[in-house]
Amino acid sequence: MMDSTGLFFFTINYSFFTDAAGIAGNLFALVLFVSPFPTFRRIIRNKSTEQFSGLPYIYGLLNGLVCLWYGLPIVSNGTVIAVAVVNSIGATFQLFYIAIFIIYAEKEIRVKMMGLLLGVFGVFAAIAFASLNLFEPPERQIFVGYLSAMSLISMFASPMFVINLVIKTKSVEYMPFSLSLATFLTSFSFFLFGALKCDLFLWVPNGIGMILGIMQLVLYYYCINVYGDDSRVPLLESFV
């Protein structure tokens, strides 16, 4: 049986590790948000989106908005306000990237991206309206929690489009290592944070994201070591 002193130190350590995981998740998330900078510097320099995909940024924006909503006190009673803060920053970054992508994309892709962007805002507005008008706490948190988990999984799964292309072309040209590493570290940190918080809506999707991040890193390592410089050749297919 644990005495009062042991219980006190256990509580302190538990709180410390939970806070540390949350802080690490926020820091790695910031790294994740800025990791596409080299990609967009290249897009601006070449005035072309080349074969880069815009889908990860669309998914990233939707995920940022939904997770921002999940973390607000009106939904989750302020228990995960740090999630709202970091996702508000993330949504701003994603919107910035999407704007640049639209500016430099070919006409057909530009129209498609604009349609997807409007769709994201429409879906988020519908989620906010439904959660406020159809649900009361704690059902509201459960409803938005399921949606945030699904949006997180879709965001982490969006690079699968690129993974499929990497496997077919044996090129990692459009799967930046920094983005894959930041994805793994962010999802791993929030997986721990969610597990320590006993928040199913955080640790499950981030656990899936952690596994997908490992898959990207393993594939990157394999291509670089097996195909060498040939793994950096430009891709031939264009997709959004």
Image: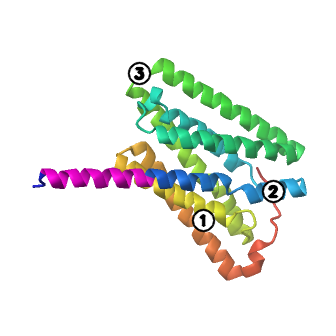
Label 2 neighbourhood size at 10 Å, few (<14), some (14-19), many (20+)?
few
- Where is residue 76? Give x, y as percent: 43, 32
The extreme left residue here reads 1
Whether residue 202 is visible, yes or no, is yes
Q: Are marks 1 and 2 in contact (CB under 8 Å)?
A: no
Q: Secondary structure at mark 2?
A: helix
Label 1 neighbourhood size at 10 Å, few (<14), some (14-19), many (20+)?
many
* C-alpha gap between disc 1 and disc 3: 40 Å
Give the extent of the magenta segment: 4-21
> Eyeballing the image, is 163 above or below 29?
below
- Closer to the camera: disc 1 or disc 2? 2
185 or 219: nearer the eye?
185
Tag shown at residue 216: 1
Mark 2 is on which residue type? Arg
> Eyeballing the image, is 140 above or below 238?
above
Q: Look at 69% across and 59% down and name the residue there.
A: 162
Viewport quadrant of the N terminus: bottom left
Q: Is residue 51 left or right of residue 150?
A: right
Q: Which residue is mark 2?
A: 41
Tag shown at residue 136: 3
Q: Look at 60% across and 36% down and name the residue there.
A: 65
* C-alpha gap between disc 3 and disc 2: 45 Å
Q: Look at 62% across and 26% down and name the residue there.
A: 125
